[in-house]
Image: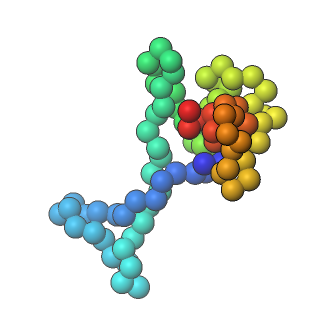
Amino acid sequence: MPKENKNWGVEVNVVGEDGKLVYGADGKVLKKKVRMGDGRFANGSPQSLYFADNDKEHAGKFKGMATILAEQGFKNTSKIQAECVGFKCKKGATNCCCHHILYN
């Protein structure tokens, strides 16, 4: 998951109306990117992981971990690294990187 906003989603197989996989001319299963479902704020209300389609600067793009955490109330998220080297956070760490904060 990127820290900054990019056009990011989850790649899934294309399925036809008959429920069967759709193949391309090369014989490989066709793929498409879909948006991830909304997250939730502590009060249970939905949190979109993407900017609104009418956003002037980032229309429809993934918000990124730093923005998602900032919306959740975390401070200085733009200064926190995206992930610890090799995803190996220090034992007992709670806010060493955006990835670890989201995981917890």
Apparent side of residue 52 relative to residue 26 in the rendered image (left or right): right
Q: Nearer the viewer, residue 74 or 86?
A: 86
Relative image position of residue 29 (x, y in whole percent): 36, 74
When the figure is inspected, residue 21 is found, relative to residue 27, above or below; the finding is: above
From the top left corner, tell me how far across and down residue 2 is, in percent.
Answer: 65, 48
- Residue beneath the point at 56% across and 33% down: 104
For the view shown, which residue lies furthest in the bottom direction?
A: 26
* Vertical order, 44 against 55 (above or below): above
Q: Quadrant of residue 17?
A: bottom left
Residue 74: image quadrant is: top right
Q: Residue at x 44, y 18 (%)?
A: 44
> As drawn, which residue projects farthest toward the top?
43
- Placement of 40 over or under 83, stated as above or below: above
Q: Residue 13 location, x and y as percent?
A: 36, 64
Q: Position of residue 63 (x, y in %)?
A: 63, 38
For the question of whether residue 72 can be seen, the reply is: yes
Give me the residue at 60% from left, 43% from top. Answer: 62
- Residue at image point 25% right, 64% down: 16
Determine which quarter of the picture holds residue 57.
Answer: top right
Residue 102 relative to residue 24: left or right: right
